Image (cartoon, helix red, strand yellow):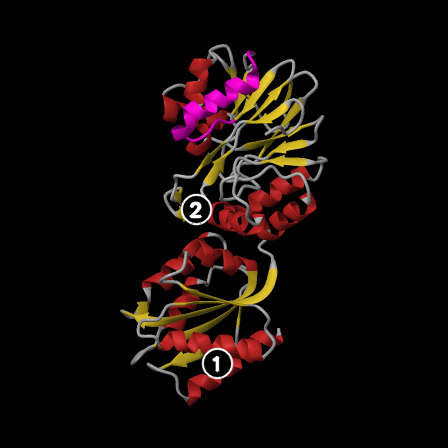
């Protein structure tokens, strides 16, 4: 892929991976992106996952057309991008490794060397001239590791964005960007909204025409759309109006209550209702939904004087990622001592700007007239907002 006349894509697609970071399902694989600028001096941006080292070096060699790189710019030290630094250093012994001071400490941990004899340490605002292309390095700590920086290329107005603006899915797969980018963001970056907001403020001072992330496609059009989504996500704003119901059910009675609530929500005018069975769905999808929509209903059983494990894990995933600024309602089920609402609310007590519904639903084993009335009240309250 040619980005511009002098900038080329040399990344790879991984179709063999089943779990990204050992956790996130990636049915369409994932891309590990790398780029090279061939100017008077040549700069390579990041490497790829260790399993694709030979393929990447072959692509790099083809892009160089007999020339030798002057720099390897390491924006992020996570192994899916840094695993081939040592292989590059051996293949091109004259090349300088360019990165942050924290990254060189990590290189010593990963490879047993910090390349002291051939390194260039950059800080926020450092620049590097390649000829026609001038690079400015912009610190982006905790987006989503502490050593990260992104790079702005002045002539072509290109942002090499490290893991920001990335998504799951190989680059030869046709799919909507937002869905897998959202799941990627809230799974991996979501905790660090404050740091992403800080980066966006820095970037507002630059004219960006193209975004080259380390995962996913190169973004050339609708950049206001992508930047707008990142602003919404990182400020924990509501992207779409709707109600998410996340539930667990042991013998089906809580599920019946959830289905009734969904029916009543639609009757009251709610156009979008999303239901996630936490025992069976992709948890990352459920987390994505909770952050996408403005209203969340948590429905579960009392279990061992606590709550069902899938629900506990789900709420932990939300709080770990700074869940906030949402409306939350509760449905609990218990045959003799319902405690789920109290436990769930306690788990959310440190979340900021949570508004709890006045109506709650208490089921004693199975639905009756009283709990059906509570479901009606909850649906009406959620739809009036």
Seen in the picture, residue 30 relative to 45 is either above or below; the reply is below
Viewer-proximal residue among 47 and 176:
176
Which mark is in front, 2 or 1? 2
- Is residue 173 rendered to the left or right of residue 312? right
Residue 53 among magenta residues? yes
The stretch of residues the image draws in magenta is 46-66
Seen in the picture, residue 200 relative to 356 is either above or below; the reply is above
Marker disc for residue 375: 1
Q: CA distance from mark 2 to mark 1?
A: 36 Å
- Is residue 298 rendered to the left or right of residue 140? left
Residue 105 drawn at (x, y percent): 43, 25
**Crowding at mark 1 (Cα within 10 Å: few <14, some 14-19, many 20+):** many
Would residue 360 be visible to someone looking at this image? no
Query: What residue is drawn where x is 40% and y is 60%?
Result: 281
Q: Which residue is mark 2?
A: 26
How many labels sit on residues?
2
Seen in the picture, residue 237 relative to 32 is either above or below; the reply is below
Residue 111 drawn at (x, y percent): 37, 22
- Is residue 330 rendered to the left or right of residue 164? left
Give the secondary structure at mark 2: loop
Query: What residue is drawn where x is 57% and y is 39%?
Result: 217
Residue 62 drawn at (x, y percent): 53, 19
Residue 227 drawn at (x, y percent): 65, 45
């Amino acid at each position: 892929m040619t980005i511009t006349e002098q900038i080329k894509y040399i990344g790879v697609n991984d179709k063999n991976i089943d779990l990204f970071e050992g956790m996130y399902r990636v049915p369409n694989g994932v891309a590990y992106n790398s780029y090279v600028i061939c100017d008077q001096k040549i700069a390579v941006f990041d490497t790829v996952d260790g399993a694709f080292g030979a393929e990447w070096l072959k692509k790099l060699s083809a892009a160089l057309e007999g020339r030798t790189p002057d720099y390897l710019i390491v924006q992020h030290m996570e192994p899916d991008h840094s695993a081939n630094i040592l292989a590059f250093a051996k293949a091109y012994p004259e090349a300088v490794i360019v990165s942050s001071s924290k990254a060189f400490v990590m290189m010593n941990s990963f490879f047993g060397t910090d390349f002291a004899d051939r390194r260039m340490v950059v800080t926020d605002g450092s620049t590097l001239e390649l000829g026609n292309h001038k690079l400015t390095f912009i610190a982006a700590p905790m987006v989503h590791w502490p050593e990260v920086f992104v790079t702005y290329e002045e002539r072509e107005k290109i942002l090499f964005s490290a893991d920001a603006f990335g998504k799951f899915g190989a680059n030869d797969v046709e799919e909507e960007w937002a869905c897998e980018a959202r799941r990627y963001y809230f799974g991996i970056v979501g905790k660090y909204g404050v740091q992403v907001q800080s980066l966006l403020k820095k970037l507002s001072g630059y004219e960006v025409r193209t975004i080259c992330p380390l995962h996913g496609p190169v973004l050339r059009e609708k950049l206001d759309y992508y930047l707008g989504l990142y602003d919404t996500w990182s400020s924990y704003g509501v992207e779409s109006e709707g109600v998410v119901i996340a539930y667990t059910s042991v013998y089906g009675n809580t599920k019946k209550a959830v289905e009734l609530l969904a029916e009543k929500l639609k009757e009251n005018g709610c156009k979008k209702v999303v239901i996630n069975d936490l025992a069976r769905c992709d948890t990352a999808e459920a987390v994505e939904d909770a952050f996408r929509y403005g209203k969340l209903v948590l429905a579960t059983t009392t279990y061992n004087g606590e709550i069902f494990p899938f629900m506990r894990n789900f709420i932990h995933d939300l709080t770990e990622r700074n869940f906030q600024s949402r409306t939350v309602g509760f449905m609990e089920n218990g045959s003799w001592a319902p405690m789920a609402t109290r436990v769930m609310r306690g788990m959310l007590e440190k979340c900021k700007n949570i508004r709890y519904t006045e109506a709650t639903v208490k089921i004693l084993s199975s639905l009756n007239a009283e709990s059906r009335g509570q479901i009606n009240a909850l649906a009406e309250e959620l739809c009036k907002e």
